[in-house]
Image: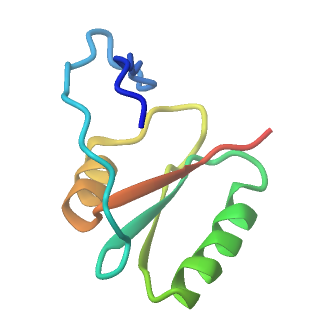
Amino acid sequence: MNSAPVTLHDPTAETTPATRPRRPPLPTLRGRTVALFDIGKSRAGEFLDHLETRLRARGVTTARFAKPTNAKPATAAILRDIAAGADAVVEALAD
């Protein structure tokens, strides 16, 4: 494992991003809930459908979330729901 420092950049539309410590990776997804987050790009839903099928086949619980449009940041309510109901997130990007 590489112990070199990692710089993470916040991809949100925050004008002054909050500094957050990086969480360690989950040791397993068993018994966890993975949020599948569709940001509204074309074919993102198709990708998440496939991923959801694969995760559920392995006994992983999934929860679906979506932004109303890819042109705007996710609402605070969506972000709160994801944070409250998921242990990990897959954000679907496409293009």
Q: Position of residue 90 (x, y in %)?
A: 50, 54
The image quadrant where one finds the N terminus is top left
Q: Position of residue 79 (x, y in %)?
A: 30, 48
In the image, residue 64 above or below residue 44: below
Res. 63 image quadrant: bottom left
Left or right of residue 18, residue 40 in this image = right
Res. 9 image quadrant: top left
Q: Residue at x 35, y 42 (%)?
A: 75
Left or right of residue 76, residue 64 in this image = right
Q: Residue at x 60, y 39 (%)?
A: 70
Q: Residue at x 57, y 89 (%)?
A: 57
Nearest to the observer: residue 46 or residue 2: 2
Nearest to the observer: residue 28 or residue 78: 28
Q: Position of residue 28 (x, y in %)?
A: 35, 69
In the image, residue 16 above or below residue 25: above
In the image, residue 52 above or below residue 56: above
Q: Position of residue 56 (x, y in %)?
A: 53, 85
Nearest to the observer: residue 37 or residue 20: 20
Q: Residue at x 71, y 62 (%)?
A: 47
